[in-house]
Amino acid sequence: MERKNIFLLTSLIMSIALFATIYILFLIDILHLPGFPPSLIPYEYIHEFILILPGPIYTDIPLLFLFPLLIFALYAFIAPIFTQILHKIYDFSFTFRTKPKYGILRAGIRIKTTSLIYRAIMVSLFAFGTISLISQFGYGNVFRATAGDITGIEPLIRAENAFFGTFFFTSLSLILFVPIWILEDCGIVAYRSFKNQRKLPVIQGVYKWYMNVVEIYTGFSTITAYLFLIFDTFGFMINELAPGDPAILTPLILLFLPLIVTGLFAIPLYLYERYLEKIQNRVHSRFAKDNITYIDIPSFDELKSIKRE
């Protein structure tokens, strides 16, 4: 088994294990097993789980795994059209500047394990950071079924909102990331040169224009989310909760949640890697209609061997 597939399998197992643990702890609570503290898992965790989704945990979990599969399938189907739209938007941004020329690099279909992990974690961090900010601003209750008086435990409620919301928002985050991945994997590049100007030529993947914005936001939101988690939630836990209180479980899981939720889209990401070559061929055929064809970038040694006129 390839190393990248080991990562996908591990993340899938971790997500399934988390859901199984939640249900096992719930069973321990309702069976009143001796030696275990009461209220290990609140009622809402099972009978509501993610409030914005219909039904209990038994229907929410299949939906969480189904949504990413549908998103990948949709983008695989519309990849030629949507990739062309992203290219047109990129080209329009040069309306008042020197327009680039475009080409297609034969990038191949293999991907390093670290690059695949980076992609998956970026989606998870984007979802986690965004939902944490939403929870801090007081709008996270749309994800959690809040029961009873929450006065005095607001930091824990915000942590639970972030917990449930991250699972839900991971699928929506894929709507943003998957087309950028396709644009990168299909090797669409832009080349700009500036004759008689003191400015170096620029060759860049078109995807990078989009990814730069996403990466900057993801970094900012992730750092902010962990600062809130450490100083807001953990500060409350240290000062207000007794050691061993079951309420500390959710905030602790939040530390590793970006790793766990990658399992939600492990299967569609595996299928995407397997069928990438077919997606590339369809996208390249579409761009050929606009006279955007394959190009080769000379190696550094070849550039050095070019004689000046």
Image (cartoon, grey):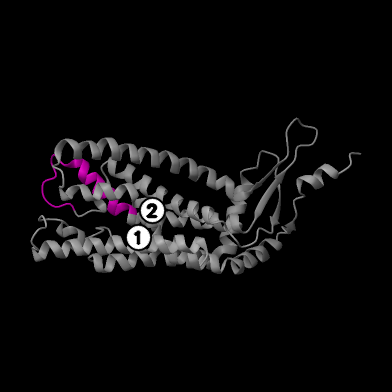
- Whether residue 298 appears in magenta in the rendering, the answer is no
Residue 196: name its quadrant: top right
Question: Which amino acid, by three-letter code, is at mark 2?
Answer: Leu
Q: Residue at x 51, y 61 (%)?
A: 3
Q: How many neighbours does mark 1 have within 10 angstroms: few (below 14), some (14-19), or many (20 or more)?
A: some
Number of numbered discs on residues: 2
Q: Secondary structure at mark 2?
A: helix
Q: Nearer the viewer, residue 280 or 299?
A: 299
Residue sitting at the far top? 198
Which residue lies under the disc numbered 2? 259
- Whether residue 153 appears in magenta in the rendering, the answer is yes
Q: How many neighbours does mark 2 have within 10 angstroms: few (below 14), some (14-19), or many (20 or more)?
A: many
Residue 53: name its quadrant: bottom left
Q: Secondary structure at mark 1?
A: helix
Q: Residue at x 51, y 63 (%)?
A: 75
Q: Residue at x 11, y 57 (%)?
A: 36
Disc with the residue nearer the chain's start (2 vs 1): 1
Question: Which amino acid, by three-letter code, is at mark 1?
Answer: Met
Residue 4: x %, y % from top left: 50, 60
The stretch of residues the image draws in magenta is: 146-166
Which residue lies under the disc numbered 1? 14
